[in-house]
Amino acid sequence: MTSLMGDLPFSRLLKRNIREGFKLWLTVAGVGGPDLTGEIDIVFGSPNFPAEVRSVFFDVAIPLRSRFKYEVSNKCTLFLDFTRPEVLNFAMLPSHCSS
């Protein structure tokens, strides 16, 4: 039995879609540089990888959500923000006295 999507038999196509659907995708945002999105080897092997990383976003559900509109029940999402907050910012003063 062949699928309507090509010459691959349905079981091989299903296995390939499942295998590709569970790959980890990430987004790396650079400080003043480009944002890179894709699989681990594509992002970290890119010649455009930023010298300074502002944030990293991991989501294991992106491939299944974007390709098949399928929301998995067991998923992991992680956002790492490497920006430094200002320690003392006197531009933002409280408007009321503390009690």
Image (cartoon, rainbow, N blue to C red):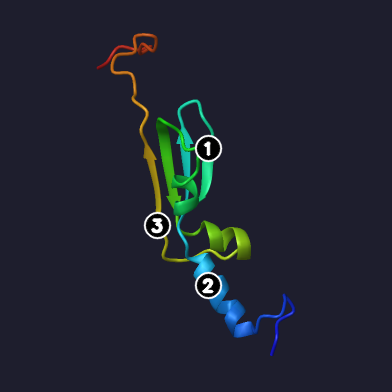
User: Is residue 39 among the parts visible in the rendering?
Assistant: no
Image x and y of residue 37, in percent:
53, 46
User: Is residue 68 among the parts visible in the rendering?
Assistant: yes
Nearer to us of marks 3 and 2 is: 2
Image x and y of residue 49, in percent:
47, 38
Q: Give the label on residue 35, or none.
A: 1
Picture residue at 53% right of the left edge, 66% below the top: 20
Toward the viewer: 31 or 91?
31
Q: Are marks 1 and 3 in contact (CB under 8 Å)?
A: no
Query: With respect to residue 12, does 94 lie above or below?
Result: above
Picture residue at 27% right of the left edge, 15% below the top: 98
Q: Are marks 1 and 2 in contact (CB under 8 Å)?
A: no
Is 79 positioned to the left or the right of 39 in the image? left
Picture residue at 40% right of the left edge, 30% below the top: 52
**Disc 2 target residue:** 18
**Disc 3 target residue:** 76
